[in-house]
Image (spheres, helix red, strand yellow):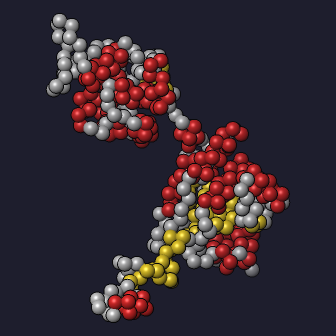
């Protein structure tokens, strides 16, 4: 084992070690352990031990093995420099008591057998500095290594290479896009419905002569909500525009009712342009039609066009609106506030997705974001694949309860007398 190793790699190596010792640790549990250490203070040994035990151990019979291997593997006091762990080699072997029904190692040379023997071999491997990375464990190491999806989950879209863009495109298509359902005015037959269906009840009674009388029931029908996506493709969004269009393509082809618009200095409807089986051809069609790509930004004017020309056609039956923009606006912030207030009143839920929100140092200080914030129901990041997964989960959980909206009145600007 090398003297210096990335902490996440050491955590995965420890999970491999547990598996060699007979503890049933899965790949998912190992990845949960790696994610868990991001949310705890790893300088506190007991807190770190509890996190490892909660993620990696599922059977109480494995607790003694876990405790001994944990003490061996993480015995030296860790010192962290720039996120790397300095770890000395473990020294003594901790002997494990034999389990009932298993052989023990006697003075005459009798050897251990079964799972306990494998566990002691794993302890001895720790003493010798082998964490399961030998040639006979290569397949197991591969199982616990990061998959491309895990590597790309946290990487910012702006830093993607061309090859990574192709990979993330496939991952987007594998996401399940569903949106919360709304109650319709229509009713459908249901044996446990709360409403009595008199007509069906009468038709059934004619078949049996009225004896016995079977009451037919109905319940309210539910339908998926309309989703409207309005994406900023101006110059300030150039680093994200391509990948976000692929996101719109994936969500439009994965859901039944989606309307898509893009804007820079003016609004362009691209719903039909994205209805193509080949994503590359769809992207080329959008690039040809959108004349203000990578240009200036007029968010207020673009939303005004949407409210005047498209809102009544696409914002029906409790629609959900996604606005994707960084908030940089060269237009009138007063106009933006007015149109945001109008748009919020017209839709069921207004969600603003900002790729800059993924940065911990970001603050919405631009004039555009300051004008829009009072009328946003959900303010969420959209800068990596993990944020797309969070968005997909959020959309699926939208229910019949509207968010509490604390709207602020938009007053006209006063002029000096």
- Left or right: where 253 falls relative to 291: left
Residue sitting at x 41%, y 90%: 203
Q: Is residue 147 above or below residue 221?
A: above
Residue sitting at x 61%, y 59%: 254
- Left or right: where 260 falls relative to 266: left
Coordinates of residue 205 in the picture (x, y in percent): 36, 91
Q: Quadrant of the C terminus?
A: bottom right
Q: Is residue 199 above or below residue 163?
A: below
Query: Is residue 293 at all visible to an observer of this figure?
Result: no
**Residue situated in front as seen by the camera: 206 or 381:** 206
Query: Is residue 228 at all visible to an observer of this figure?
Result: yes
Coordinates of residue 36 in the picture (x, y in percent): 41, 40
Coordinates of residue 218 in the picture (x, y in percent): 41, 82
**Residue situated in front as seen by the camera: 182 or 306:** 182
Residue 151 falls in which quadrant of the image? Answer: top right
Q: Quadrant of the N terminus?
A: top left
Coordinates of residue 161 in the picture (x, y in percent): 69, 38
Residue sitting at x 63%, y 75%: 315
**Residue situated in front as seen by the camera: 120 or 357:** 120
Q: Is residue 82 above or below residue 207?
A: above
Q: Is residue 62 above or below residue 282?
A: above
- Left or right: where 311 falls relative to 146: right
Residue sitting at x 57%, y 77%: 317
């Amino acid at each position: 084992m090398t003297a210096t190793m990335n902490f996440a790699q050491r955590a995965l190596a420890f999970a491999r070690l547990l598996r060699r010792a007979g503890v049933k640790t899965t790949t998912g549990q190992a990845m949960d352990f790696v994610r868990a250490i991001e949310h705890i203070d790893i300088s506190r040994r007991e807190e770190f031990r509890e996190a490892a035990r909660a993620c990696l151990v599922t059977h109480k019979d494995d607790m003694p093995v876990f405790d001994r291997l944990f003490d061996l593997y993480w015995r030296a006091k860790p010192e962290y420099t720039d996120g790397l762990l300095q770890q000395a080699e473990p020294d003594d072997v901790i002997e494990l008591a034999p389990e009932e029904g298993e052989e023990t190692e006697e003075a005459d040379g009798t050897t251990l057998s079964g799972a306990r023997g494998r566990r002691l071999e794993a302890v001895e491997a720790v003493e010798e500095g082998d964490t399961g990375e030998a040639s006979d464990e290569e397949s197991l190491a591969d199982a616990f290594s990061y998959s491309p999806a895990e590597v790309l989950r946290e990487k910012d879209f702006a830093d993607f290479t061309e090859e990574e863009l192709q990979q993330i495109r496939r991952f987007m298509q594998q996401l399940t896009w569903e949106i919360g359902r709304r109650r319709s005015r229509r009713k459908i037959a249901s044996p446990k419905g709360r409403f009595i269906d008199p007509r069906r009840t009468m038709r059934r009674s004619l078949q049996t002569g009225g004896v016995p009388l079977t009451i037919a029931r109905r319940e309210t029908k539910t339908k998926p909500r309309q989703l409207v996506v309005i994406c900023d493709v101006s110059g300030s969004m150039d680093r994200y525009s391509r990948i976000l269009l692929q996101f719109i393509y994936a969500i439009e082809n994965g859901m039944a009712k989606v309307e898509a618009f893009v804007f820079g200095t003016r609004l362009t409807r691209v719903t039909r342009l994205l209805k193509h089986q080949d994503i590359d051809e769809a992207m080329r069609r959008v690039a040809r039609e959108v004349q203000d790509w990578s240009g200036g930004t007029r968010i207020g004017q673009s939303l005004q066009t949407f409210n005047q020309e498209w809102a009544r056609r696409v914002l029906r039956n409790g629609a959900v609106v996604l606005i994707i923009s960084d908030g940089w606006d060269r237009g009138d912030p007063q106009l933006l506030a007015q149109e945001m207030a109008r748009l919020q009143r017209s839709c069921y839920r207004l969600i603003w997705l900002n790729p800059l929100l993924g940065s911990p140092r970001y603050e919405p200080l631009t004039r555009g974001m300051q004008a829009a914030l009072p009328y946003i129901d959900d303010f969420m990041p959209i800068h990596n694949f993990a944020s797309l997964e969070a968005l997909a989960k959020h959309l699926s959980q939208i229910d019949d309860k509207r968010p509490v909206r604390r709207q602020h009145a938009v007053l006209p600007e006063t002029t000096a007398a």
